[in-house]
Amino acid sequence: MNFVKNVIKDFFFTTILLSLIAGLWFLYLYFIPEHSVKLIIISIAIVIYIDIRFFLKKRTGVRSGPR
């Protein structure tokens, strides 16, 4: 049962992060087309940082940073 709960949580967090990437991609592509590739790469890096910093801690109980 705990495994199913973790799968649902991971799916929820992944959906949030993918929708954030898609929203930023849409914003960059249609409103700032001359810098869209650089901004998309930066936004993917930001989303990976958010995932490691906040969601990994909630999923595994691992703290990031100094204690």
Image (cartoon, grey):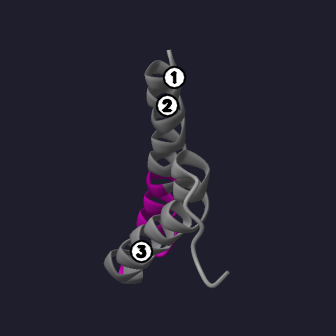
Q: Secondary structure at mark 2?
A: helix
Q: Which residue is mark 1?
A: 2
Percent across and percent down for residue 28 are 47, 68
**How far apart are the two marked residues, 1 and 3, measured between alpha carbons?**
30 Å
CB atoms of marks 1 and 2 within 8 Å:
yes
Q: Amino acid at mark 3?
A: Ala
Give above or below for 47 relative to 4: below
- Residue occupying image coordinates x 50% and y 73%: 46
- Label 1 residue SS: helix
Q: Which residue is found at the position 44% from the left and 66% from the top? A: 48
In this picture, is 1 found above or below 47? above
* The C terminus lies in quadrant: bottom right
Report which residue position mark 2 lands on. 6
Q: Which residue is labeled 3 in the image?
A: 45
Q: Write down the region rendered in magenta.
A: 21-34
Task: Report the mark closest to the observer, 1 or 2.
Answer: 1
| Labels 2 and 3 touching (C-beta < 8 A) | no
Q: Quadrant of residue 14?
A: top left
* Horizontal relation, residue 67 to residue 20: left or right: right
SS type, badge 3:
helix
Question: Majority secondary structure of the magenta segment?
Answer: helix
Q: Position of residue 13 (x, y in %)?
A: 53, 42
Q: Nearer the viewer, mark 2 or mark 3?
A: 2
Q: Tell me: 22 left or right of 58.
A: left
Residue at the spot 48% in from the left edge and 75% down from the top edge: 32
**Comes first in the chain, label 1 or label 3:** 1
Question: Horizontal placement of 5 versus 37: left or right?
Answer: right
Tally of numbered discs = 3
Q: CA distance from mark 1 to mark 2?
A: 6 Å
Q: Are the two marked residues, 1 and 3, in contact with CB atoms closer than 8 angstroms?
A: no
Q: What's the CA distance linking mark 2 and mark 3?
A: 24 Å
